[in-house]
Amino acid sequence: MGEAAQAPGRPPSARPPRLLRAVAVVAGGALLAGLLQIVQTAGAPGAHAATGSGSRTAAVTLTKVDPRVPAKDGSVTVSGTVTNNSKSTITDAHVGVRIAPGGPLTSRSAMKSATARSGFTSYLDGSEIDGHTVGVAKIPAGQSAPFALKVPVKSLGLDAAGVYQLGVTLNGETAAEPGEHVLGIQRTFLPWYDGDSAAAKATQIGYLWPLTDRPHVSARGDTDSEQSPIFLDDDLAKELAPGGRLQQMVDLAKSLPVTWAIDPDLLASVDFMTKPYRVAGPGGDITRTTEGTGTAVAKAWLNALKSAVAGDQVIALPFGDTDLASVAHVGLKVSGTRNHLKTAAELGAGTVETVLGVKATSDVAWPVDGAVDPDIVSVARTAGARRIIARSDSIVEGDTLSYTPNAARPIGHGVTAVVADAPLSTDFDGDMLHAENANLAVQDFIAQTLMITMQAPEIQRTLLVTPERMPAVSQAQAMAEAIGAVDTSPWAATADFDTVAKAKADPAANRKVPSAKRYPKSLRKQELSKDVFDLIATTQGGLNSFVPILTDKDKVTVPFGTSVLRAMSTGWRGDSGGAVTFANSMGDYLQDLINAVHILPKTTLTLSGRSGTIPVTVKNELNQPITGLVLRLTSNTDIRLEIKNSQQPITIEGGHTRTLKFQTKASANGRVKVTAALYTTQGALYQNTKIVAFDVKITKVTDLVMLIIAAGLLLLVLAGVRIYRQRKRQAAAADDGGEGDGGGGQDDGDPGQPGDPGADTDDTGRESVELSPTGEKVEG
């Protein structure tokens, strides 16, 4: 303490008495604790909610503001409930409204601050409007009570056009805190636009209305109908049915001025469903498929969509809604990924035009949450995009602008960034199932559009709003209400995407694409893994080698091409395991197709001669003819077994087998290992790599046996000649009167004499040949 504070006439004390020090410590501690409590109370709404005291004794829930934009001579009705969060009964309570002092709010940041505050502050929230309150009965602890209060607009003190802070408060008392005071407050905004006091240029606003979903079609086709895929599940039928998300998205927007952003894969999938289709069993089991249930709702949904988009601009997203950020940050590390981007863009536009019968815009890229960096922009350009939808929390404005600039601005290389307004785009991201949340979000959305106009009423602005990619039904309903209200307001006008993208860029608007370091970590964690792109590359390589043998290549390349694009879909965000499983399934299916063309196994063959033919059978289980393969037969010892026509081209009809015969020449007995394999015409081993090996057992007759047999045959011939000549002589002797009887002469053909040519005839005839072993027998 300073000297002036001491008692006059007393010398300064070198050390305060121990008691005084103790008192000071206690008093200082109490003061500090009190200050900390005040600070914590002011900054931590949760602490007040727990204690349920002061202006946080009750929670005020505001479920309706009607009308959302009041008329000059009308009234405003606020409805909701109040809930007692304290341990005491609330008595002598009433609900009233307050307009914050100082007139309309002056900036969007002021609106944000108002919604962030908790608890009641008199100089910020203003005074209760006298004469316009509604009483509330006693509210026991933990109980709620409804309210509805109607207030004339003229009593609100609205003057200049703009956005006013509207507070709805509950006044009353409890046994713990007697005396009337504010027990709870809820704030919202009241847009006021009197034609007599406002003359602003209406802000043009473009609304993107997305129709996207996660992939539902598997890589495998239905074997009973090659043109019909197998669906991973039948969930899409529920989305298309009355009350489903996709049905509501179409029904809500059919009368709204929106630009549709559609994933062509969704249209293709629904189009498949308009005909009979099959659904995989539990765990994706394609051997236990069931009939799909969504044919009727698919037809109805497509018809409703065709009617709804008539006259509106339609943006065709890349087929499968390619995750551009994943491709840019991960996919480009894998060879071949970039090639799929152009395919996705081209196929996307064609699919939308074919299914819906409308000309679609296809030069637009929409990264997740509008978050961009140089790599994402580069990937978008590769895909053919000239307009990239970003968001203002990615391309952030500096402090040089006091108003919201136009959405469009050039970012180099002929590319325009169309920067959506982040606060408007994210207004409905939360839980809209609760009426209060939806009500406050709609009111905030409407008020923000007026604030934007009043920031610079003399400057024409053109904005873009992009909601979540797959909004829930409750979110879509709140969005539709807000868009409808703004569309009929005098301070805003509707524009399609092209109008927004072609608007003149504000010279002071930020045109710099943020660096990769600024890309949100939360979004990067959701990206597709490198495993997915590696699996895609492996499958694509195998497909490129497989399709040359097909006579109808489109039956395979088209479904596999679309499956690759589905594997790169934004719909897999948050489901990395599902993405890997899907990519794996493509490779498994391709291998099954490759294995459908194969050589039938063979058992041991027996070759019982110098030459013969070896038959080899190839089966084609595909549903189309194959060509361009060569069947090659190889012996492990060409000296023992020579295969003359060892390579033969083969063509087989779908669902058939074909047997080719290979000419062989044997030179020695024994077993020979023979292999049969399929090769491409370029000399590469066919991909299934299932080489069929079998043994050929050679039992060729030797040269010595052949000589003995030949000698025996010669002896037989000579004996026959001798007998013939002998009989001829006997006949001649008979003609001479019997004088030529040779009975007493020497018989040269006596079989008993050694060396007689016919002596070994019977033994030679009985020479046995070794039997062939069990198994196939080579054709001689």
Image: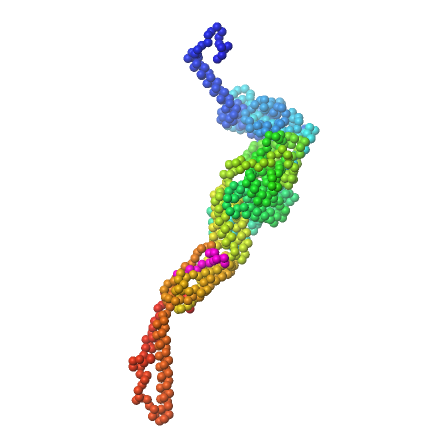
Q: Say which quarter of the image contains residue 730.
A: bottom left
**Residue depicted at x 57% and y 28%:** 113
Instruction: Measuring from the top left, give residue 487's x and y in whole percent.
Output: 65, 36
Q: Is residue 480 visible?
A: no
**Magenta stretch in the rendered image:** 673-686
Instruction: Measuring from the top left, give residue 106's x and y in whole percent.
Output: 62, 27
Front residue of 584 and 660 = 660
- Is 296 above or below relative to 629? above
**Residue depicted at x 32% and y 75%:** 763
| Total labels drawn | 0
Residue 680 highlighted magenta (yes or no) = yes
**Residue depicted at x 52% and y 24%:** 42
- Is 637 above or below relative to 119? below
**Residue depicted at x 54% and y 55%:** 553
The outermost residue toward the top is: 9
Instruction: Measuring from the top left, give residue 576's x and y in whole percent.
Output: 49, 42
- Residue 769 shown left or right of residue 561 in the figure: left
**Figure quadrant of the C terminus:** bottom left
Q: Which colour scheme is used?
A: rainbow
The outermost residue toward the bottom is: 737
